[in-house]
Amino acid sequence: MPKRNPGKSKNHLYSANKAPTNPWLFGLHTVTAALLNKNRQIKRLLVTSTSHGRLPEAALKGFQPEFVGREDLATLLPPGAIHQGVAVLCAQLPLPILDDIIADAPKNAVIMVLDQVTDPQNVGAIMRSAAAFGAHALIMQDRHAPQITGALAKAASGAVETLPLVRVTNLSRALKNLKVARFWCVGLDGESDNVLSKIKTDGRIALVMGAEDAGIRRLTAESCDIIARLPTIDSFGTLNVSAAATAALYECARQQNS
């Protein structure tokens, strides 16, 4: 069966630093993005006869799909997976190194930093928003953070293929490195007196989001330059972390493009 194996990536942002992942990705947007990613080694492409025509020709170039029934496909995936009739078995992507990400960052780069956000759906949704608003990368920990499973990739809707994901051991140290590189580290906390829209965010920005229940940890907050909140009304409370991340990313994009 013809397969595309890109071998060692020539992109200097990627290294041999890898984290375990679920090899099956599913869903039309997710699979299309994986097929188009030259850094992704595809081992098998499974499609149903009705879904084959929904994949773009450019994505199928160089691959020989295996036709299967919907029930057979479902048995390979997690229960309840919304596969839309397509799935790929693939090797994990190599993860970038923070130093390389910083070296490659433009003067108005926005980096999303997640402090123990553990829900895969939230992480996937944040990755999708970060990619949509042109974020430079996403940083999260080796521990207390989800791996890139098929469900997370589905929630990210292809963003796992385009948004560099950096895993670090020590988040406070990573923030220190970002500050040395002239990133303004802004932590989001609904209890802050500072409103994000009143803070200048048109240069290099690191947006730091905490876990939905606990928020940003004390040491992480102390590593930030400033803590801010979104202008939600007091009677409503705080937003879900993925919704808050989207609003914060929009505010940064608004200021940078104004």
Image (cartoon, rainbow, N blue to C red):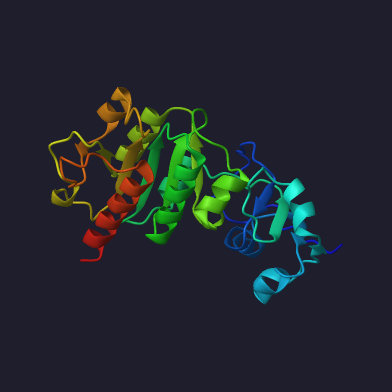
Number of callouts in the render? 0
Q: Nearer the viewer, residue 184 or 216?
A: 216
Q: Which of 139 and 48 is in front in this view?
A: 48
Q: Which of 179 and 41 is in front in this view?
A: 41
Residue 16 is left or right of residue 238, and the answer is right
The answer to whether residue 172 is visible is yes
142 shown above or below 6: above
The answer to whether residue 43 is visible is no
Rendering quarter of residue 176: top left
Q: Which residue lies furthest to the top in this view?
A: 218
| Residue drawn at 13 percent across, 50 percent down | 198
222 shown above or below 92: above
| Residue drawn at 69 percent across, 60 percent down | 86
Q: Position of residue 78 (x, y in %)?
A: 67, 43
31 shown above or below 239: below
Q: Nearer the viewer, residue 149 or 11?
A: 149
Residue 75 is left or right of residue 78, and the answer is right
Q: Where is residue 57 in the image (x, y as percent from the top left)?
A: 68, 76
